[in-house]
Image: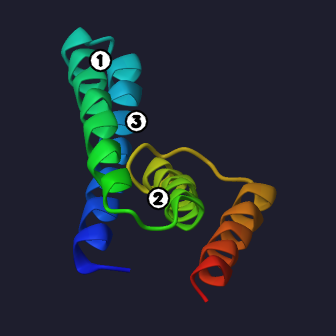
Amino acid sequence: MKLITWGLLFLLIFIEVLSEYLIKTSVAYSNLKYLYLGVLTYLLVGLAFYFYIKQGESFAVLNTIWQGSNVVIIGLLSYFLLNEKLSYIQIIGMLVTLFGIILVNV
């Protein structure tokens, strides 16, 4: 994969994780400002995804990395920042997801 593709992929993952965090924070604190920021950053996800697709890389591989990374990162952020509990099944699911991302990249 090209360096620009990896950069767009990580930007996409970061923006989506930020969106999820802002929306969850808006619910936790009943603050609409976080909700509006979360929705705005989700719009940026669409824009970043557009540029990401234009790079011409394998859509299946890039989408798998994007979706799998979101599952793992959001799970970890929920645990560490929002103090949510993870069950053993969820932890195993995140490990299997990481393994799947590695297999897709081989």
Q: Residue at x 34, y 62 (%)?
A: 9
Residue 85 in the image: state x and y as whole percent.
62, 48
Q: Amino acid at mark 3?
A: Glu
Residue beneath disc 2:
73
Residue beneath disc 1:
35
Residue 18 lies, with reference to residue 64, above or below; the image says: above
Residue 87 in the image: state x and y as whole percent.
74, 54
Query: For numbered disc 3, what is the local secondary structure?
Result: helix
Query: For numbered disc 1, what is the local secondary structure?
Result: helix
Query: For numbered disc 2, what is the local secondary structure?
Result: helix
Is residue 27 or residue 14 the one in the foreground?
14
Label located before the other in sequence (1 or 2) = 1
Placement of the N terminus among the 4 image quadrants: bottom left
Label located before the other in sequence (3 or 1) = 3
Q: Residue reaching furthest bottom?
A: 106
Q: Residue at x 32, y 19 (%)?
A: 29
Mark 2–mark 3 distance (CA, rounded to whole Å): 11 Å
The quarter of the picture where residue 19 lies is top left
Residue 2 in the image: state x and y as whole percent.
30, 79
Q: Which mark is residue 20?
A: 3
Residue 96 lies, with reference to residue 76, above or below; the image says: below
Residue 55 in the image: state x and y as whole percent.
31, 62
Looking at the image, residue 77 sits to the left or right of residue 33; the answer is right
Q: Residue at x 66, y 53 (%)?
A: 86
Q: Amino acid at mark 1?
A: Leu
